[in-house]
Structures are given as C-alpha cells and as structure tokens.
C-alpha cells in the first residue's frame, strides 16, 4: 500500500477539482471557495483518521456541508423597499448557448442539483451518490428522474424557443 499524501500535497493536487464541484453546487465563486475551505478545514482536523481515501472523505464533507448550508432558513438575502439597479441587458446572446444549462440547473431544487452534479458531472454511480448524500439508492434514482424531467421541460433548454443566431443560414433573409 502507498503512503497517504500529506495534507498540503492533497490540497495542491485536488483543490481544483473540488472547487469545480463546489461551484457546480453553489453557482457562486465566493460561496464555492467558502464551501471548499470549510470542507478542507474539517478534513484537516480528521486527517490522521482518513488515511484510506482522503478524497472520498473530503467529497462527503463537501456535500454534507453544502446540505447543511441550504437547510438553514436564512440564505443571505435581505428584503428591501427599493429594487436593485437594472442589469446590463440580456446576457444570453453575449455568452452563447452555455448559459442555458446553468440557468436551468439553478432552477432545480438543491437536492436534485446535488444528485445531477454527482451523477453526471462527477460521473459517480447511484450507490456512490447515495453514500455521499447519506440517502438510499432509491432516493437518488427518484431525485435524478425528477431533475431530468424538470430539465427536459425547462424553457432555457427548449430548442424551439431559442432565438436563431446570426450564423444560422435559416435566420438570414435574402436581400434580393
């Protein structure tokens, strides 16, 4: 058996992938960094006990911490009498097709989003996903099924509602 990597080496080697997973869950760079830092702090305290598979432990801590964050009543929003400034316009055209999936994922309930991230972005099995989320395989299957059904009918992903692009030959009009 090989040696357990030093904590600093582990963080240097795996923090990029773990930060990517955190971002997929939170859709916010600052929250993703906070989530990863909190998870790594918890893992550091248990480093001597997790010699077998530190990454699996850190991922479980990451998802459990994320779950406790969204179970809290307060989510950082404050009610105000005035609306914030208007945005700079529709970002859909500026960023291309990529924003469609992000906006659809943001509309999923957090538990369903976590299942989709683990199953399709992290490429874990249903059993591994259930272990990380602390639920049954049946719950993973049902949450995944519900999430995919919501994504299928999400207007951001509907092909018939997409605007034709300037490069699409069907959208150009003949000048003659």
Image (cartoon, rainbow, N blue to C red):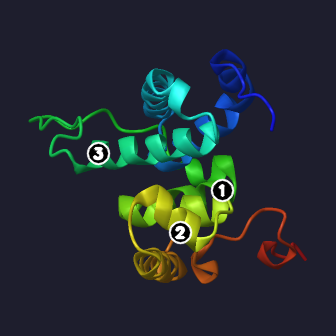
Q: What secondary structure is marked by label 3? A: helix
Looking at the picture, does residue 159 appear above or below residue 37? below
Distance between mark 3 and mark 1 Cα atoms: 21 Å
Residue found farthest to the left: 81
**Which numbered disc flags the more N-terminal residue, 2 or 1?**
1
The disc placed on residue 122 is 1
Q: Which residue, given by chain and number where applicable, does mark 2 sit on? A: 156
Distance between mark 2 and mark 1 Cα atoms: 23 Å
Image point (69%, 19%), residue name? 6
Left or right: 94 as drawn, with respect to 155: right
The quadrant the N terminus occupies is: top right
Question: Residue 115: x percent and y percent?
Answer: 49, 65
Q: What secondary structure is marked by label 2? A: loop
Cβ atoms at labels 2 and 1 below 8 Å apart: no
Residue 51 quadrant: top right
Looking at the picture, does residue 158 appear above or below residue 54? below
Image point (47%, 27%), residue name? 46
Can residue 7 be seen in the rendering of this structure? yes
Can residue 20 be seen in the rendering of this structure? no
Q: Which residue, given by chain and number where applicable, does mark 3 sit on? A: 68
Question: Residue 45: x percent and y percent?
Answer: 44, 22
Question: Residue 116: x percent and y percent?
Answer: 54, 65
The quadrant the C terminus occupies is: bottom right
**Which numbered disc flags the more N-terminal residue, 3 or 1?**
3
Query: How many numbered marks are there?
Result: 3
Foreground mark, 2 or 3, reads 3
User: Label 2 neighbourhood size at 10 Å, few (<14), some (14-19), many (20+)?
Assistant: some
Image point (60%, 35%), residue name? 19
Distance between mark 2 and mark 3 Cα atoms: 29 Å
Foreground mark, 2 or 1, reads 1
Left or right: 27 as drawn, with respect to 176: left
């Amino acid at each position: 058996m090989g040696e357990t990597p030093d904590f600093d080496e582990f963080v240097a080697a795996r923090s990029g992938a773990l930060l990517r997973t955190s971002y997929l869950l939170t859709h916010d760079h600052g929250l993703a960094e906070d989530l990863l830092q909190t998870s790594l702090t918890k893992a550091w305290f248990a480093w001597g006990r997790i010699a077998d598979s530190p990454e699996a432990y850190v991922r479980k801590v990451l998802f459990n911490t994320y779950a406790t964050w969204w179970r809290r009543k307060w989510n950082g929003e404050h009610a105000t009498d005035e609306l914030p400034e208007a945005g700079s316009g529709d970002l859909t055209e500026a960023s291309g097709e990529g924003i469609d999936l992000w906006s659809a994922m943001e509309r999923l309930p957090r538990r369903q989003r976590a299942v989709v991230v683990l199953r399709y972005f992290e490429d874990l099995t249903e059993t591994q996903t259930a272990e990380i989320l602390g639920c049954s395989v049946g719950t993973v299957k049902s949450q995944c099924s519900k999430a995919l059904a919501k994504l299928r009918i999400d207007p951001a992903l509907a092909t018939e509602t997409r605007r034709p692009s300037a490069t699409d030959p069907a959208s150009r009009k003949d000048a003659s």
